[in-house]
Image: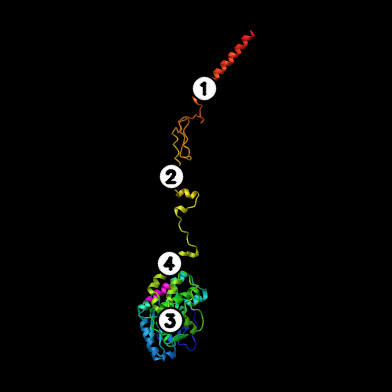
Amino acid sequence: MAMMRLRREDPRVVGSFRLHRRLGAGGMGVVYLGSDRRGQRVALKVIRPDLAEDQEFRSRFAREVSAARRIRGGCTARLVAADLEAERPWFATQYVPGPSLHDKVAEDGPLLAADVAAIGAALSEGLVAVHEAGVVHRDLKPSNILLSPKGPRIIDFGIAWATGASTLTHVGTAVGSPGFLAPEQVRGAAVTPATDVFALGATLAYAAMADSPFGHGSSEVMLYRVVHEEPQLHGVPDALAPLVRACLAKDPEERPSTLQLSMRLKEIAAREAQGLPDGRPPAPRPQRADERPTGRLTERYTERTPQDRTPPRPQASRPSSPRHPSRPGGRTPSKPGVRTGSGVRTGANGRMPANPRLLRQRIFVFVVVTLIVLLGIAAAQGLQG
């Protein structure tokens, strides 16, 4: 958080706290960095002199501080001390190191969906504690959210309902920042916890887009858009857009509760974080058995049928020769000299022998022909003699 030197007109001691630096100034007064005798650091706000003279403001301020004392939760800056009867009333809260959400986005740009959801989940959980204490923040916005090393913290809760408490504008007695005010605040209607839900939705949209969902313009233009126009959420991630839009509903009854928001945003934050671990793409989904690629790897997973399996090699002690791999049709070549499935014997060389009947016929013809030739030769010799 940016700090500035104390000015000549700034006090050096307030109550039991010594002031060291200026942290900022707003519609209600100036905020200082202070510390007590034990070294505990606080953010101490001193009310403006003109508001200190307003008795109505003092009464409202006293009620709000009393309610703030009841807030218990890790997402708020705990109230440490206050003096409502001082010439210039003041209160001190736990000092939260870290930039505001507004400054973080202004410097680094829009946040990732997982970060927006995580911040929103913590803030909505903090608002549950605030609302259970009977307090409505009324001015939740990026500059009132500090990003500490231990998580986001809400500051300036429950003290914005006062004349002159806003640096921008107010309608009736409703005070706050245009673009983050709920429609019922603009109309001057009663505020409820749903009012903070609207502001939280606008804050999350700002964190995701680095811009207000209602654009820019004068206070009057901004307030008109809040009441009559729909928010522009084109830059909000798809995972968050429906929930943010529900928070920005014009009717308070249509907005989700802070408890519902906390649970839903935790789910979104977890899913978004798991979907992109360390910026790497998500792991591919497992393939089904019928989607496995062909090749050698398939043989490791595809179970073979019995006739397709290669039989084990026989032991060396067996006299028979090893069987060959199976052939189409499932038939296995026979051993030499054995009868095959067709009933025909094969020789040792694998050739089919001659038909015995045909062999006898051929021998008979050979003998007959030989005899005829011999008789012919004998007859010729007799004629010559």
**Which disc number belongs to residue 270?**
4
Circle 1: residue type = Gln
> What is the three-letter code of the residue carrying label 2?
Thr
| C-alpha gap between disc 2 and disc 1 | 50 Å
Residues under numbered marks 4 and 3 in contact, where contact means CB atoms less than 8 Å apart: no
Tell me if residue 234 is in the magenta stretch.
no
Look at 39% across and 90% down and name the residue there.
56
Q: Residue 183 got which mark?
A: 3
Q: Name the residue under label 2.
A: 305
Sequence-wise first label, 2 or 4: 4
Q: Distance between the residues labelled 4 and 3?
A: 32 Å
Residue occupied by mark 1: 361
Q: Which amino acid type is marked by label 4?
A: Ala
Q: How far apart are marks 2 and 4 (CA)?
A: 46 Å
Q: Of discs 4 and 3, which sits in the foreground?
A: 3
Tell me: residue 271, above or below residue 170: above
In the rendered structure, which amino acid carries the disc numbered 3?
Pro
Note whether 9 is above or below 42 in the view shown: below
Mark sitting earlier along the chain (3/2): 3
Residue 129 is situated, as x and y percent measured from the top left of the image, at: 37, 76
**Magenta segment boundaries in residue numbering:** 120-128
